[in-house]
Amino acid sequence: MIALTLAEIAEIVGGRLHRTDGGERVTGSVEFDSRRLTAGGLFVALPGERVDGHDFAAKAVAGGAAGVLAAREVAAPAVIVPPLPPGKAHERSVALVADSDGSGAAVLAALAKLARYVVDTLSRDGLTVVGVTGSSGKTSTKDLIAQLLEPLGPTVAPPGSFNNELGHPWTALRADTETRHLVLELSARGPGHIAELAAVAPPRIGAVLNVGSAHVGEFGSREGIARTKGELVEALPQDGVAVLNLDDPLVAAMAERTKARIVGVGESREATVRAEDVRLDEHARASFRLVAPQGEADVRLSLVGEHHVGNALAAAAVALELGSPVADVAGHLSGAQRRSQRRMEVATRADGLTVLNDSYNANPESMRAALKTLASMTSGAGARRRSWAVLGVMGELGADSVSAHDEIGRLAVRLNISRLVVVGEQAAAMHHGASHEGSWGEESVLVPDTDAAIALLREQLRPDDVVLVKASKVAELWRVADALLGEGTA
């Protein structure tokens, strides 16, 4: 963050000073976890599900923090933020904040104001903010963009999927006077959420990857999801750039919703930045010819799955807009590595068993992509390897939940997956769909929980099998992957 006094922070967020004249200078990081504070940092006191950050305020300052951003008076130098007006506290609530009086929401609102001030200040000095959204692939694409931009100058991006009302301003406040690029991932649980995040750190470049079925239970339809995802391009300035996936009609239609210049990406001939001659190797890693107005170059991704081609094109478009030569973009894409855990994380045991841990989250689109990746890894030259899909519930699908799970089970049969293990009654429609599609017997099995899945796999897996593990976070299917790889217990 840029250096600010507590008095300046109080003025920015509309708070009042407590136990200080405001002269303390914040020169370190802004943290809501007191264990991560650096000397001169600002501690953000958030009420949580288990503990209240206000109880750690004095300890944080004793440990070197310059002050505290809080909703009530604490035994330390602090900026106290006023409560939000009635109704606003609910709008800003997040899972991490479980207070009933709105104080956590008020602190989040103050954090957003502080982040906006810092981003505006740095943008005047040359900071470029890049925003990424979509129903799937946001985190992987954010990681790719960061790796392409780092050679052009200091770049800040969030760890993992830290993309909500807390993670967004927290990430923005990692930027300082040396930062040239701020890459942010924007998620939404309902209409208006992306617009609100974009207001915290206004992007100059915005990339929309796709419109799928994730959270359709909250939005009502894919068209409703598209309206919300399009809030990102609506937030772009006239001199900004909207990177749109032309292979997705709902994304392509967003061109009418922005003042910014459009850069289309995809495999379509109409795409400004496109992939030609896409091929997959025996490990499901894609190669393609990157074609752009700036030139052409070959790309060979080390990431597993054909779906990463679209992610790579979006990242390439951003890097090309910011001045990276085509040859450099292709080279950095070819060398890019997975940075976030449990997203097509491939590991092979000493006996040859391969585990594809894609257990961080799931929706119908990402589930289909993962199954196609599994199939490609066990076909052709690798046809002797058995493929196992260990799948759990896809959350937040609303009325479409049963049909969506049924279709995934049927797809497993059509892709000739050797064995399907469905974990949990909530995902039972996958098992039923597979059984009806292929008249399967033992090829598909429904087990009650992760422990049962682990026991079955340990009994029946053979060396050189390939196992995909995927579900929404609530299923905690990473326990299966960890157990198979010896990193966890049954």
Image (tube, rainbow, N blue to C red):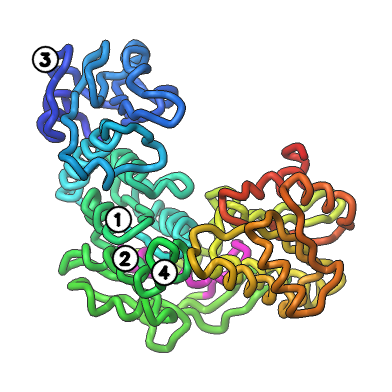
Residue at 36% over, 81% down: 272
Q: Is residue 317 magenta?
A: yes
Q: Residues within 10 Å of mark 3 (few under 14, many from 20)?
A: few
Q: Which residue is mark 1?
A: 193
State which tag comes first along the sequence, 1 or 4.
Answer: 1
Which circle marks residue 21 in the picture? 3
State the image quarter where residue 239 is shown: bottom left
Q: Which residue is mark 4?
A: 209
- Please provide percent x and percent y for residue 378: 77, 71
Real-space CA distance between mark 2 and mark 1, rounded to the nearest whole angstrom = 8 Å
Q: Amino acid at mark 1?
A: His
State which tag comes first along the sequence, 3 or 1.
Answer: 3
Residues at discs 1 and 4 in contact (Cβ within 8 Å): no
Q: Amino acid at mark 3?
A: Asp
Q: Is residue 49 left or right of residue 445?
A: left
**SS at circle 4:** loop
